Image (tube, rainbow, N blue to C red):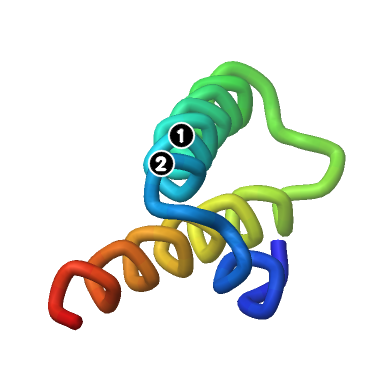
Amino acid sequence: MKQSEIKQLSIAELQEKLSESKKSYTDLKMAHTISPLDNPIQLRVARRTVARVATELTNRDVQ
């Protein structure tokens, strides 16, 4: 998910997206632990998506 897409979401949508992204990242990590993923770059993309959404939530709380 791109930063421009994240900025357009409301706070409630961001919180929902954050929980979905964290669950997706956890599932990917577990799958990768059991057997290697075909595309391990998915882990990096998922982790960065979680970070982007969390950062946007933090920025909105500060403002």
Q: Which residue is mark 1?
A: 16
Q: Are marks 2 and 1 in contact (CB under 8 Å)?
A: yes
Q: Nearer the viewer, residue 10 or 43?
A: 10
Q: Nearer the viewer, residue 17 or 35?
A: 17
Q: Residues within 10 Å of mark 1 (few under 14, many from 20)?
A: few
In the rendered structure, the answer to whether residue 35 lies left or right of residue 55 reads right
- What amino acid type is highlighted by mark number 2? Ala
Residue drawn at x 41%, y 33% is 19
Q: Which residue is mark 2?
A: 12
In the rendering, at what x and y percent does residue 32 appear?
Answer: 61, 30
**Which image quadrant is residue 50 in?**
bottom left
Disc 2 is placed on an element classified as helix
- What amino acid type is highlighted by mark number 1? Glu
In the rendering, at what x and y percent does residue 52 appear?
Answer: 47, 68
Disc 1 is placed on an element classified as helix
Q: Answer above or below: position of 7 versus 20.
A: below
Residue drawn at x 47%, y 27% is 23
Most distant residue in the top direction: 34
Residue drawn at x 55%, y 59% is 49
Q: Nearer the viewer, residue 20 or 62?
A: 62
